[in-house]
């Protein structure tokens, strides 16, 4: 009996080990889940969104693996992000922190904002006003203008602007160095991104992956584990939707 129990225990440990290896492989090589804690990517991503990021999109660096268990420099199977991708990356100033923003500047680009409008290599990106509305911002409500902005590769998305004369709506020219990217949030006047010194340009090595689709979304009134609140808090329309 004792021998049989010992064999059963070994089988259970082996099964658990295999399950852990499969889970870690899935998370490290294919997709990793992330949740959105701030409003810097509104309206594309909302606080309480849960999404999958494809790890293979840009290749692999040490930041692709949990806890940096595979330490090495640079990237393997490297691929370049496209302008307009929504990407997760490690903050250069603190690589324990994950950020998610939109790729707007590629290596060699010149980036500038003038009057709230984004210029890439001295050409203004076209934007079309789609409306105004009042949205929550912390403990208060603010009025924003929504625009559809279109990249030179044809990719379009919606941005929010409080005004065209906010703190970072008129900037110097940023020159993106080789091997780096310029990131911005879609909630333009409420996003700390590459316009700020404590974020800056993002090295290729710091990219984790491209945001692909939402698998869950819940209002701030409920956390993911508070299942008893789900019937009133889940954003059903956002579940399984792609990220543009």
Image: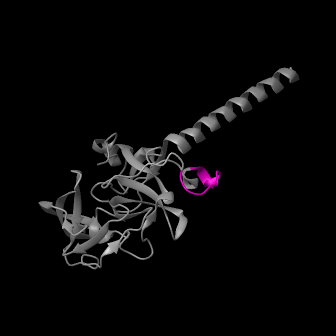
Q: Residue at x 27, y 57 (%)?
A: 43
Q: Look at the image and give the residue range highlighted in magenta.
A: 65-75
Position of the N terminus by quadrant: top right
Q: Is residue 158 left or right of residue 218?
A: left
Q: Is residue 43 left or right of residue 130?
A: right
Q: Is residue 11 above or below residue 124?
A: above
Q: Residue at x 30, y 44 (%)?
A: 238
Count of all numbered marks drawn on residues in the image: 0
The front one of 63 and 137 is 63
Q: Residue at x 20, y 78 (%)?
A: 165
Q: Is residue 70 magenta?
A: yes
Q: Residue at x 55, y 53 (%)?
A: 61
The front one of 149 and 22 is 149
Q: Is residue 170 magenta?
A: no
Q: Position of residue 163 (x, y in %)?
A: 19, 74
Question: Is residue 225 shown to the viewer in this render?
Answer: no
Q: Is residue 160 above or below residue 21?
A: below
| Displayed quadrant of residue 38 | bottom left
The front one of 214 and 208 is 208
Give the image's coloring scheme.
one colour
Q: Is residue 160 above or below residue 65?
A: below
Q: Is residue 22 left or right of residue 238?
A: right
Q: Position of residue 117 (x, y in %)?
A: 20, 69
Question: Is residue 182 shown to the viewer in this render?
Answer: yes
Q: Is residue 128 left or right of residue 170?
A: left
Q: Position of residue 136 (x, y in %)?
A: 27, 65
Q: Position of residue 22 (x, y in %)?
A: 60, 35
| Displayed quadrant of residue 63 | bottom right
Type of secondary structure dominating the magenta stretch: loop
């Amino acid at each position: 009996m004792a021998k049989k129990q010992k064999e059963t225990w070994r089988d259970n440990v082996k099964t658990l080990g295999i399950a852990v290896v499969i889970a870690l492989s899935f998370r490290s090589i294919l997709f990793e889940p992330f949740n959105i804690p701030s409003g810097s990517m509104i309206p594309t991503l909302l606080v309480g969104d849960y999404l999958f990021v494809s790890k293979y999109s840009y290749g692999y660096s040490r930041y692709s693996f949990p806890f940096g268990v595979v330490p090495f420099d640079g990237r393997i199977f490297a691929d370049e992000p496209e302008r307009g991708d929504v990407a997760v990356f490690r903050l250069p100033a603190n690589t324990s922190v994950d950020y998610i923003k939109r790729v707007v500047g590629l290596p060699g680009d010149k980036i500038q904002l003038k009057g709230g409008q984004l210029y890439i290599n001295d050409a203004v990106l076209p934007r079309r006003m789609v409306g105004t509305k009042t949205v929550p911002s912390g403990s208060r409500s603010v009025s924003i203008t929504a625009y559809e902005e279109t990249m030179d590769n044809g990719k379009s998305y919606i941005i929010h602007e409080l005004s065209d004369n906010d703190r970072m709506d008129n900037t110097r020219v940023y020159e993106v160095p080789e091997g780096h990217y310029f990131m911005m949030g879609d909630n333009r006047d409420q996003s700390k991104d590459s316009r700020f010194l404590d974020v800056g340009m993002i090295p290729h090595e710091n990219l984790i992956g491209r945001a692909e689709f939402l698998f869950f979304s819940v209002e701030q009134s409920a956390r993911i584990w508070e299942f008893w609140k789900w019937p009133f808090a889940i954003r059903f329309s956002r579940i399984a939707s792609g990220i543009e």
